[in-house]
Image: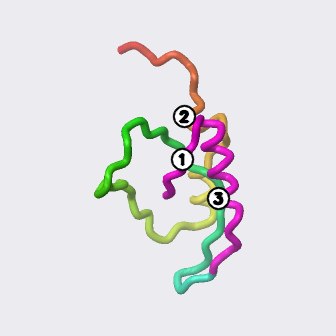
Amino acid sequence: MRLLRATSREVAYRKALRFGSKFRPQKTYGGEWRFAGISMLLPLFDPIEDGSEILWKDHGSMTVAKIKRLVKSKKQLSVFDDSEPTKC
């Protein structure tokens, strides 16, 4: 998970792809880290304060197939969904 400063969702998307793509595969004790794509892109509207926390879930060891299922195309990311919200 990374925080990126961007002026728009388009800029954030491009920065995220560039950031992930610049790292070569890294071998670790548990396997190998590779950039597979973006699974979530969220806007932050409030200022980040010293001591802010990012909540995340540890998925543990994952297969390549499971990782590929998490990765979304640009149009699948909720930040690019411009449809009208449904009324309850």
Label 1 residue SS: loop
User: Where the C terminus falls, by quadrant?
Assistant: top left
Disc 1 versus disc 3: nearer the observer: 1
Residue 61, relative to residue 52: is it above or below? below
Magenta residues span 1-26
Label 3 residue SS: helix
Pointer 1 local density, CA inside 10 Å: few below 14, some 14–19, many at least 20? few
Relative side of 10 to 78, left or right: right
Location of mark 1 (residue): 5
Residue 56, relative to residue 14: is it above or below? below
Which amino acid type is shown beneath numbered disc 2?
A: Val
| Rendered residue at 57%/42% (across/down) | 6
Residue 54, relative to residue 74: is it above or below? below
| Relative depth, front residue between 58 and 46 | 46
From the top left corner, tell me how far across and down residue 50 is, in percent.
31, 56
In the image, which disc is placed on residue 19?
3
Is the residue under label 3 in contact with that under label 2 (CB below 8 Å)? no
| Relative depth, front residue between 41 and 59 | 41
From the top left corner, tell me how far across and down residue 33 is, in percent.
61, 72
Location of mark 2 (residue): 79
Residue 86, image quadrant: top left
Indicate yes or no whether the magenta region holds residue 75.
Answer: no
Give me the C-alpha separation between circle 2 and circle 3.
18 Å
Give me the C-alpha separation between circle 1 and circle 3.
12 Å
| Rendered residue at 58%/37% (across/down) | 7
